[in-house]
């Protein structure tokens, strides 16, 4: 119990320190020590509970804590009303008003209802704690150096104390969310993450940031109200407010509250038609994207649906949730093909992967849930690495356009190696995401071949857009001026550690599965699934070969003479050293053109305006059918 309370309470103490300490140097050391303490506590919790056959449950009186949580929720709603009126965002004002009445009303409806077990620790909770404590902590360390340069480049008012305080408040809420079993506690922490996201997206205080912050707030507040509706329904009809008891109810009793709570998860994980809030969130500083919108906050959405997966197994509601995820996975992957801006590409690829996790969770079989958890782990590590690397590249070349990243392997070699590892982790065999997609395909073919169709074509699109980007990075363009001196030691430490973790979680995934995922699946489903030893050996051999790629690209530059492409004798020589920026040539019509290599983006086929509208309409219809099925 002490470790649980430490993980939730310690970040709150650091939050207060962040607001009080003015010195950036002192603040940086406090962050490093705090992150080390949180990582150590997360690992210690794992060591204490890794051999538990059944979940460990904790009970204590919440008589004094519950009113404090209610007051905090009310104060947040009042703040949103005040700022919403100031900024003329009346939808947020309206939802905050409903939230006030809903919070007060729930207190009367749930009066006397108390969870038998406030906290529950099982293997799924341990996985989430490790992602929050280690990956989230590393992102905090990265932010120390990044935010200093961010204010210099972006000319944004320096409110770093507020930024770091909000980050630590968010970490506290995430720990509370995944460790709590009392649904009202989960909702409380759920709303804290929404509020922190709103504050961090609006951090630049520019019109587009404020607009996108409110969009994220409005959509997630709507999801939070659905969550509250599910809790009230469950308590009113079944007399329980505990998450772990939902799956023990009959399908008729559990399905309605499970669908309402899962709707909140669909919104939080930015599934169509709610994906616009995550896309807009990319205006925030890069650590915000890495922490909230790839490794933790959006994972809270899929986490809650995974928790409810046994309820959905074999039901029409589960099939509809799986279809919502499948449509999102396919269309977001296709839209990513059309994106020049690499941050938007990462945003759409995040949405697509979350869609695949929702698909697996909706199917609800033991193979699909095993896959969903595996996807969650691999994606959190690799995508955090990619976001942080992209933020560093942006500060180096002052661009997020893929077409401006020609030859980055020579200009920013170490950052590019980290990028290549992250990209490989997302789609190249034998890295984790491909293993997960293989497992997802196998699970979905068994459960629902129609949904497997979406996975096949969505995965093909993933291969396309990541390959285009990788090709740009490893091009040889001379002359190349090194541009990595501005990167701080804290940033190098984070990117290097996450790169190593991306490799290790793949190499060690059989161990991760055996120690963490399989016991959870065994307890919930009484089944175990895993890869055979032959496939694992092949995977390790392939990984060893692939990891040589970035280093071979660098090594082959030594002692080599580089020349430009031969254009049938039509090259125009203007320099003494013809390979240096000599890219002009005569066409067949004797016109002079610049030699350039550019990707195809197929905006006319995969543009956001076209496919986004299709996905919006399709998933609105699916959501309407979903609620119609369970309510009528």
Image (tube, rainbow, N blue to C red):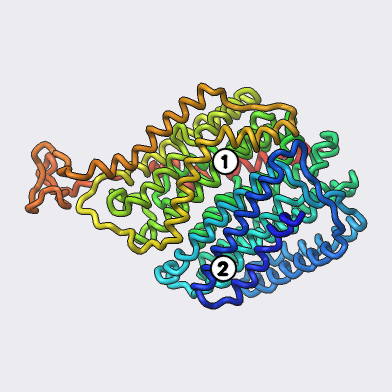
Instruction: Name the quadrant of the N terminus.
Output: bottom right
Nearest the viewer among 48 and 24 is 48
- At x 70%, y 50%, the residue is 178
- At x 27%, y 57%, the residue is 482
Q: Is residue 280 visible?
A: no
- At x 65%, y 29%, the residue is 367
Nearer to us: label 2 or label 1: 2
Give the left or right position of residue 292, taking residue 3 as reference.
left
For the residues marked 2 and 1, what is the alpha-carbon distance in whole angstroms? 40 Å
Q: Residue lying at the far right in this picture: please name it.
A: 112
Name the residue that disc number 1 marks.
Answer: 328
Give the left or right position of residue 441, taking residue 57 as reference.
left
Q: Is residue 21 visible?
A: yes
- At x 75%, y 42%, the residue is 259
Residue 321 in picture, x, y percent from top left: 67, 38
Q: Residues within 10 Å of mark 2 (few under 14, many from 20)?
A: some
Query: Is residue 239 shown above or below 319?
Result: below
Name the residue that disc number 2 marks.
Answer: 30
The quarter of the displayed image where residue 302 is located: top right
Query: Is residue 162 shown above or below 240?
Result: below
Q: Residues within 10 Å of mark 1 (few under 14, many from 20)?
A: many
Residue 432 in picture, x, y percent from top left: 51, 36
Instruction: Name the quadrant of the C terminus.
Output: top right
Q: Dot 1: what SS?
A: helix
Of the image marks 2 and 1, the number of the one nearer the N terminus? 2
């Amino acid at each position: 119990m002490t470790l649980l309370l430490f993980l939730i309470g310690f970040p709150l103490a650091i939050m207060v320190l962040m607001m009080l300490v003015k010195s950036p140097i002192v603040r940086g050391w406090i962050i490093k020590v705090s992150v080390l303490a949180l990582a150590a506590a997360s690992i210690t919790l794992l060591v204490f509970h890794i051999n538990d056959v059944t979940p460990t449950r904790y009970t204590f009186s919440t008589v004094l804590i519950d009113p404090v949580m209610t007051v905090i929720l009310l104060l947040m709603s009042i703040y949103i009303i005040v700022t919403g009126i100031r900024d003329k965002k009346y939808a947020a004002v309206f939802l905050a008003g409903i939230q006030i009445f809903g919070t007060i009303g729930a207190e009367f409806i749930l009066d006397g209802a108390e969870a038998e077990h406030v906290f529950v620790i099982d293997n799924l909770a341990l996985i989430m704690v490790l992602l929050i404590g280690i990956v989230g902590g590393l992102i905090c360390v990265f932010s120390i150096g990044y935010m200093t340069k961010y204010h210099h480049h972006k000319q944004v008012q320096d409110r770093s104390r507020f930024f770091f305080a909000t980050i630590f408040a968010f970490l506290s809420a995430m720990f509370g969310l995944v460790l709590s079993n009392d649904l009202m506690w989960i909702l409380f922490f759920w709303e804290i993450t929404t509020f922190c996201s709103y504050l961090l997206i609006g951090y630049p205080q520019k019109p587009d940031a404020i607009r996108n912050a409110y969009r994220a707030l409005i959509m997630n507040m709507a999801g939070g109200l659905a969550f509250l509706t599910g809790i009230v329904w469950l308590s009113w009809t079944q007399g329980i407010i505990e998450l772990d008891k939902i799956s023990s109810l009959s399908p008729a009793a559990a399905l309605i509250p499970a669908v309402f709570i899962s709707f909140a998860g669909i919104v939080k994980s930015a599934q169509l038609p709610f994906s616009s809030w995550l896309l807009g969130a990319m205006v925030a500083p890069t650590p915000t994207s890495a922490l909230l919108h790839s490794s933790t906050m959006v994972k809270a959405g899929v986490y809650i649906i995974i928790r409810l997966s046994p309820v959905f197994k074999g039901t029409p509601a589960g099939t509809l949730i799986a279809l919502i995820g499948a449509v999102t996975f396919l269309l977001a992957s296709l839209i990513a093909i059309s994106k020049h801006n690499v941050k938007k590409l990462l945003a759409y690829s995040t949405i697509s992967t979350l869609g695949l996790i929702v698909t697996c969770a909706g199917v609800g079989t033991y193979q699909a849930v095993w896959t969903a958890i595996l996807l969650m782990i691999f994606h959190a590590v690799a995508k955090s690495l990619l976001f942080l690397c992209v933020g560093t590249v942006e500060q180096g070349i002052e661009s997020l356009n893929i077409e401006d990243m020609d030859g980055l392997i020579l200009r920013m070699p170490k950052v590019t190696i980290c990028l290549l590892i992250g990209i490989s982790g997302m789609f190249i065999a034998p890295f984790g995401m491909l293993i997960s997609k293989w497992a997802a395909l196998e699970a979905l073919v068994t459960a629902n071949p129609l949904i497997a169709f979406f996975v096949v074509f969505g995965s093909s699109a993933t291969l396309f857009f990541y390959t285009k980007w990788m090709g740009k990075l490893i091009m040889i363009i001379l002359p190349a001026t090194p541009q990595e001196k501005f990167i701080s030691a804290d940033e190098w430490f984070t990117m290097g550690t996450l790169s190593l973790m991306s490799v290790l979680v793949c190499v060690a995934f059989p161990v991760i599965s055996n120690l963490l995922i399989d016991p959870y699946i065994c307890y919930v489903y009484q089944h175990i699934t895993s890869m055979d030893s032959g496939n694992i050996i092949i995977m390790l051999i392939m990984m060893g070969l692939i990891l040589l790629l970035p280093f071979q690209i660098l090594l082959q530059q030594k002692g080599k003479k580089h020349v430009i492409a031969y254009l049938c004798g039509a090259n125009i020589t203007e320099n003494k050293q013809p390979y240096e920026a000599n890219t002009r040539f005569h066409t067949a019509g004797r016109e002079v053109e610049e030699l350039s290599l550019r990707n195809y983006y197929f905006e006319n086929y995969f543009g956001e305006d076209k496919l986004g509208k299709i996905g919006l309409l399709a998933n609105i219809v699916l959501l309407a059918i979903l609620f119609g099925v369970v309510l009528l």
